[in-house]
Amino acid sequence: MSMSPTVIILACLGFFLDQSVWAHVGGQDKPFCSAWPSAVVPQGGHVTLRCHYRRGFNIFTLYKKDGVPVPELYNRIFWNSFLISPVTPAHAGTYRCRGFHPHSPTEWSAPSNPLVIMVTGLYEKPSLTARPGPTVRAGENVTLSCSSQSSFDIYHLSREGEAHELRLPAVPSINGTFQADFPLGPATHGETYRCFGSFHGSPYEWSDPSDPLPVSVTGIARHLHAVIRYSVAIILFTILPFFLLHRWCSKKKMLL
């Protein structure tokens, strides 16, 4: 039995309305919390926390999930963004926001994604070195070592222009420092790196950043040409036997 276009349209409309209600009640339709200019903030600096929502909830509350409570957030509402300045170690931690509609104050959104704010500059900076050196050939394996005389528990390695960092536990080395080695694999292009140290008891309170370490890569064009030649050879040696087999089979078929 066929269904009329009107019935199909009404059924689809009901499905999408049901999905919208379910997403809102189930907490899937939630705001997005972000930090500008960065979630890694130097002590004494400033950061703006922003809450974005697509359902018309323009007023938000902001709350901190862990660490030291932040008094300026108590019983406060804000419009899309909230400036924290100057930033102190007490501001380090995980934040979420919730939105509500100004014409329906009892209707709240689900909690946003967790936003972690890291505060830097609380301890002396570690040092960052590269093995085999800061200048390597294309395709050569690179390892970055972050070390310090301070007994840090964790080291964090960041790449310039990226929000996410790599982290590794610090281990005692034979020269009396605490170190972590970050294997980056084969070098393909130049980047600039920094590292930070932190302790288990205060994971969002970091040291000063290390001095920036530029890693440059030489012979990229030559390496790329070699990769292209190798790829072409692989393709030829893969396709050629099938081509020859196809021709041989075609000739046998004609003879039969």
Image (tube, rainbow, N blue to C red):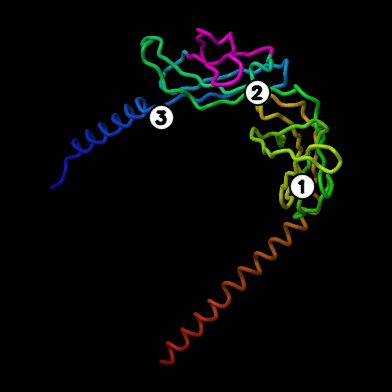
Which of labels 3 and 2 is toward the front?
A: 3
Give the spatial CA distance, label 3 vs label 1: 41 Å
* Nearer to me, 123 or 109: 123
The circle on residue 143 is 1
* SS type, badge 3: loop
Q: Which quarter of the rendered picture does the C terminus lie within?
A: bottom left
- Return the residue found at the far left: 1
Return the residue at label 2. 37
Rendering quarter of residue 212: top right
- Residue 139 versus residue 25 in the image, above or below: below
The circle on residue 28 is 3
* Nearer to me, 149 or 251: 149
Give the spatial CA distance, label 2 vs label 1: 29 Å
Q: Which residues are magenta?
A: 60-86
Q: Residue at x 70, y 65 (%)?
A: 229
Give the spatial CA distance, label 3 vs label 2: 27 Å
* SS type, badge 1: strand
Q: Residue at x 69, y 12 (%)?
A: 86
Q: Residue at x 69, y 39 (%)?
A: 168
- Residue 4 versus residue 83 in the image, above or below: below
N-terminal of the two: label 3 or label 1? 3
Residue 16 on image: x %, y %: 30, 32
Give the amino acid type for the residue marked by disc 3 in the picture.
Gln
Residue 127 on image: x %, y %: 82, 35
